[in-house]
Image: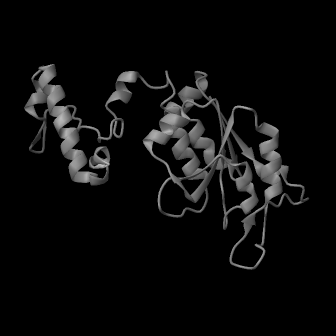
Amino acid sequence: MKIDILSIFPDMFEGFLNTSIIKRAIDSGYVSIKIHNFRDYSLDKHGRVDDYPYGGGAGMVLMCEPIFRCIDSIRTDDSYIIMMSPSGKVFKQDVAKKLSTFKHLIIICGHYEGFDERIKSIVDMEMSIGDYVLTGGELPAMVISDAIVRLIPGVISEESLKSESFNDGLLDYPNYTKPVEFRGMRVPDVLLSGHHENIEKYRMNERIKRTNEMREDLAGEDDE
């Protein structure tokens, strides 16, 4: 998979690309992630990429031309273009699974008061990571890239992915490690029993219980 991210603050991605699973996935050749500063595509001598909105209003709006020119330079027949926007479709695990099968994703990070509306004409999907507003699209772009990359076959073991939260509409089961007892809190005996069938039953019951208690919206999805 190839992921191209458009941003005017490329330095924000330095740590993201050079640590943990993302770095290993890049080094192993499972994914290529490149950050493009679309300020480099501005025709303004000062590299300007924003201007005042027609009709008045607060803030500045990202201009069409730099983004169009950047997209034109990297788009292929396999490209799927995502615009990070608070008004977009809310990102969820099923969306991550779908996007992880694509060959080429282009993610556009917004800033200021948003995008010139005409940029949407080249976008396949507007995406939001929640009902709140951030100062820019860089953090959301990292969030969805991380969620997608870890689903690419080979990046993480299949066994690890099977029981994760949201995999089947349920949250993950509780996990414990050494010591067996800590400050009066003991690991459930069933996990120490070595009885795999009972352990699986316990974990499934805990997943259902946790989902019902913490995420009623997920618990009711199968009934809709």
Can residue 74 be seen? yes
Quadrant holding the N terminus? top right
Of residues 57 and 190, the one drawn nearer to the viewer in this rendering: 57
In the figure, residue 64 lies in which quadrant? Answer: bottom right
Counting from the top left corner in percent of width and height, residue 29 is at 61, 22
Counting from the top left corner in percent of width and height, residue 168 is at 33, 36
Counting from the top left corner in percent of width and height, residue 165 is at 34, 39
Q: Which residue is at a point 55% across and 27% down the rendered structure image? A: 25
Q: Which residue is at a point 55% across and 40% down the rendered structure image? A: 145
Looking at the image, residue 223 lies above or below residue 189: below
Is residue 52 found left or right of 134 in the rendered image? right
Q: Which residue is at a point 67% across and 63% down the rendered structure image? A: 114
Residue furthest out toward the front: 224
Is residue 173 found left or right of 199 in the rendered image? right
Give the tally of numbered discs: 0
Can residue 19 be seen? no
Is residue 130 found left or right of 38 in the rendered image? left
Of residues 6 and 90, the one drawn nearer to the viewer in this rendering: 90
In the figure, residue 181 lies in which quadrant? Answer: top left
Q: Which residue is at a point 55% across and 30% down the rendered structure image? A: 101
Looking at the image, residue 55 lies above or below residue 191: below
Of residues 11 and 69, the one drawn nearer to the viewer in this rendering: 69
Counting from the top left corner in percent of width and height, residue 62 is at 74, 62
Residue furthest out toward the bottom: 56
Looking at the image, residue 125 lies above or below residue 58: above
Of residues 45 and 85, the one drawn nearer to the viewer in this rendering: 85
